Amino acid sequence: MKNIKSYTLAILIIVGLIAAVGSTDTFGTAKPECTEVQQYPVVSFNETPVQYAQVDEFRLGYREFGSGEPLLMVEGFGATMDNWNETFIGILATNYHVYIYDHRGMGYSSDNNATPSISQYADDAAALMTALGYGRMNVYGVSMGSSVSQQLAIDHPESVQKLILDSSTYSIRIPETKILRGFIEAAANNSTLSEGIHEEARANLAWKGSFDGLSSIRKDVMLVVGTNDVMTPDPVSVQMAGEMNGSWLVRFKGLPHVGSHYAPIEYGENALAFLGMDESPLNK
């Protein structure tokens, strides 16, 4: 068993349950303190121009907000950058230079007709960082974007600073994710959906998973999951956290898949706390 080392992250106890992970054995129940609600600046996707980065033979559309250390947001299955919660992105942009973008073949991004794969999407993220002028970035991946971010940290470890994995699984072929797999299979067979979504579905179904590579991720990692997530249930995140040294696990009580849509302030402040801390279990 991995050595157990607990860390107190008081700012994270706004909602739900928190575990400081060098293992998954110890959980604490957290209750919010009565504090004044902080006001955050508002961002608008519609009023923020789309920019384009040339990556190999195609272009990735992106938007940027805020200033500071770079933070790349990796979107989930079937979604575009317009589907992020504006409040959530606005909170992150108070401290970080936030980049949101569309996967190849989705939204504002073009494609080069390559065979889609989770590894290819991870390669795209690494290439986008380079095109934006960064050697590495903090990364926040949600749902399929979490799968891409895991693969990014495994295939391009030099590109990742801190890593947040939200609504995660290491494979869609495990029993716990049968609802997610059924959803993706249905999308793959739905002729009314776009080719970009079909490509993402094929990439997910072909993905062999990341479990064997999780222990190789030597980064500060935070896993975030809602306890009512039926797509990527929280026991999967518990299992993943146990495989990664330098990881925290935050469980938001009662929230579903992609909880930032339902509790953007809590998710945003949670991310800021993790990204801003200096203490790391990797140094213990």
Image (cartoon, helix red, strand yellow):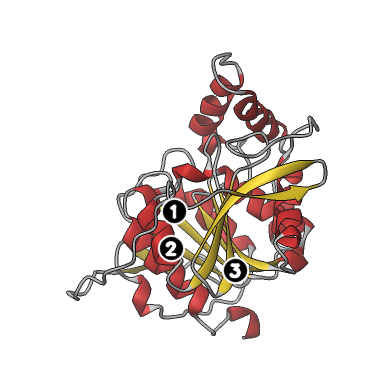
The mark nearer the N terminus, 2 or 3, is: 3
Q: Residue furthest top?
A: 191
Give the residue displayed 45% in from the left and 65% down from the top.
92
x and y percentages locating residue 262 in the rendered image: 32, 49
x and y percentages locating residue 35 in the rendered image: 19, 76
Q: Residues within 10 Å of mark 3 (few under 14, many from 20)?
A: many
Q: Is residue 18 left or right of residue 54?
A: left
Q: CA distance from mark 1 to mark 2?
A: 7 Å
Q: Secondary structure at mark 3?
A: strand
Residue corresponding to mark 3:
70
Q: Is residue 244 left or right of residue 275?
A: right
For badge 2, the amino acid type reads Val
Q: CA distance from mark 2 to mark 3?
A: 22 Å
Give the residue displayed 68% in from the left and 39% down from the top.
104
Residue placed most toward the observer, 87 or 249: 87
Picture quarter with the C terminus: bottom right
Q: Is residue 110 above or below residue 69?
A: above
Q: Is residue 270 left or right of residue 178?
A: left
x and y percentages locating residue 201 in the rendered image: 63, 29
Picture quarter with the N terminus: bottom right
Q: Is residue 208 left or right of residue 74?
A: right
Residue 18 in sight here: no
Give the residue displayed 48% in from the left and 30% down from the top.
179
Q: Is residue 35 above or below residue 18?
A: below
